[in-house]
Amino acid sequence: MDRMKRPILIHPDPRLKKVATPVADLSDELRVLADDMLETMYDAPGIGLAAPQVGILQRAVVLDCVREEGEAPRPLIMFNPEIIAASDDTKVYEEGCLSIPEQYAEVTRPAEVTARWIDRDGREQQDTFDGLWAVCVQHEIDHLDGKLFIDYLKPMKRQMITRKSQKLKRERARD
Ligand code: NI
């Protein structure tokens, strides 16, 4: 089946602030959604995307943090992902988000996390992530709880980024 790109919601949007519903049955419709999300993410280009960002309030995320030229892609599809362990060690990373284009800010998160999820075939998976993968897994799972990376920032900085995103959203709507 052909993958289809889906429009990405831009902050501020009430749908980005909602808690997404757990996936009860892994239907073909959800598999198509995940495949479309990967297509949308690669096209953007980005390294992660959560279902609420395409307006679907279900607990599904996709990611691929392989960025080296010539290295094989490693697409991951996660339904109902959960962080089940996190390191005390933290790491600061300058994050961005496909729903907040052109805005970046430093966020502190656990450096290493173990996540559990259901894969595209309905099998339970578990893995430990570090580096950029750890950042991305946490950032995407946050989306499922209506949380954006700017929610970790001080109010002034958050408001500034929100204003810029609002402006960009208006400009894009006009074009
Ligand atoms: Ni994001």
Image (cartoon, helix red, strand yellow):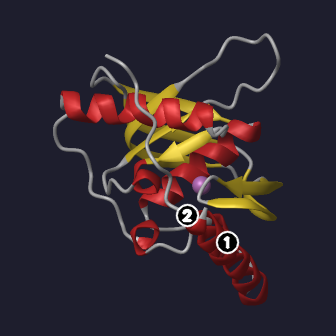
Residue at image mark 1? 165
Residue name at image x 41 percent, y 32 percent: 36
Residue located at (53% from left, 45% from top): 49
Answer few, some or many: residues within 10 Å of disc 2's Cα (few below 14, many 20 plus, some between 14 and 19): many
Front one among 83 and 157: 157
The count of marks equals 2
Can you identify the residue that label 2 sits on?
A: 10
- Residue 5 location (% of width, % of height): 46, 36
Asked if the residues shown at circle 2 and circle 1 are in contact, with their CB atoms under 8 angstroms apart, the answer is: yes
Q: Position of residue 139 (x, y in %)?
A: 60, 54
Q: Residue at x 68, y 11 (%)?
A: 72
The part of the image, by quadrant, that contains residue 2 is top left
Compared to residue 129, the image places residue 156 above or below, namely below
Q: Earlier in the sequence, mark 2 or mark 1?
A: 2
Q: Is residue 91 visible?
A: no
Residue 134 numbered tag: none
**Which x, y percent locates residue 40?**
52, 37
Which residue is drawn at the image coordinates 70% and 85% (left, top)? 159
Give the side of residue 88 with respect to residue 20, left or right: right
Q: Nearer the viewer, residue 63 or 86?
A: 63
Amino acid type, callout 1: Ser
Please, which residue is most extreme toward the front here?
175
- Dot 1 falls on a residue whose secondary structure is helix
Q: CA distance from mark 2 to mark 1?
A: 7 Å
Please state which of residues 70 and 112 is positioned toward the viewer in this rendering.
70
Instruction: Using the image as rendered, state which of residue 24 and residue 54 is in the foreground.
Output: 54
Kind of residue sitting beneath label 2: Ile
**Quadrant assignment for ligand 1:** bottom right
Q: Residues within 10 Å of mark 1 (few under 14, many from 20)?
A: many
Which quarter of the figure has residue 109? Answer: bottom right
